[in-house]
Image (cartoon, rainbow, N blue to C red):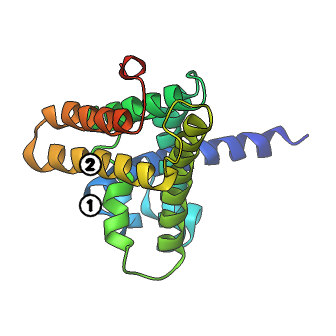
Amino acid sequence: MDVSTDLRRARGDRTRRAVLDHAVQEASVSGLDALSFGTLATSAPVNKSAIAGLFGSKEKLQLAAVERAMEIYRDHVVVPARSAPRGLPRLWALVLAWTEYSRTRVFRGGCFFRTVEVEFDMREGAVRDAVAAAQRSWESYVGHQVRTAADAGELSPGTDPDQVEFEINALLNAANDRSLLYGDDAVYGRAEAAVRALLVAHGADPAALR
C-alpha cells in the first residue's frame, strides 16, 4: 500500500468537496453559468489552477455541483423523512423536511434546484439533463409515497399519484419563491396548510398530518 498516494487522494477529495460546497452555494444564488474557476478561487481554499486541475472544464464543474447539491438535498430532505413509515406518514415528513430545508436556507439562494431548473429549462446538453434527472428522481420518490399511501388505504381509491405529486411540488416551490422574493417566512405555513388540505381532500386523516 502506498500511504503517500492514499494521503494525496484523501487531500484531493477534501479539496474537491470544499470547492463544490462553495460552488453549490454560489450557484443557488447566481446560477450554474456564473460559476468559474476564477470566481471560486476567491472563496474556496484553493487557487484557480488547482480548481481547473480538479474539474478540467466548466461543464464538468457544473455537473459536479449538481451531483453535490443532490447529496446535500438528500441529507436534508429525504434522509430525515425515512424515519417515518412509507406512505402517508413519510409523504408528510417529506413535506415538512422540504419546508425546513428551504426555510433554513441550506442553500443560500433557497432551493438550489429551483434556481438551476429555471436557468437550464430551455437549453440542451449534459447539465440540463443532470438537472432534469435530479428533479425526476425527487418527483418520482414523492409520487411513490402517494401511490403507497393510496394502496394502503391512507388516501382515497382512484387517487392519481402523479397529479397529487405535481400539486404538492407546485405548492412547495411557490413557498420557496415567495419567501425569497418577499422575505416572508409565513409562506411556509401557508404551503403546509395547502398541502394538508390537498391530502385531506384525497381522503387523508387530518390527525395524521401534524
Image coordinates for residue 112, horizontal then vertical, percent: 36, 52
Q: Residue at x 41, y 65 (%)?
A: 37
Quarter residue 150 falls in:
top right
Q: Quadrant of residue 27?
A: bottom left
Q: Is residue 205 visible?
A: yes
Can residue 41 be seen here? The reply is: no
Mark 2 and mark 1 residues within 8 Å of each other at the beta carbon: yes
Answer above or below: position of 65 versus 179.
below
Give the residue at mark 2.
Answer: 109
Count of numbered labels shown in the rendering:
2
User: Which residue is pictured at 71% across the width and 46% down the height?
Assistant: 9
In the rendered structure, the answer to whether residue 4 lies left or right of residue 37 reads: right
Q: Secondary structure at mark 1?
A: helix
Q: Amino acid at mark 1?
A: Ser
Camera-nearest residue between 27 and 208: 208
- List x then y, in percent, for residue 153: 57, 31
Amino acid type indicated by mark 2: Gly
Can you tell which mark lies on residue 30?
1
How dense is the environment of label 1, judged by Cα within 10 Å: few (below 14), some, or many (20 and up)?
some
Mark 2 and mark 1: span between their CA atoms? 8 Å
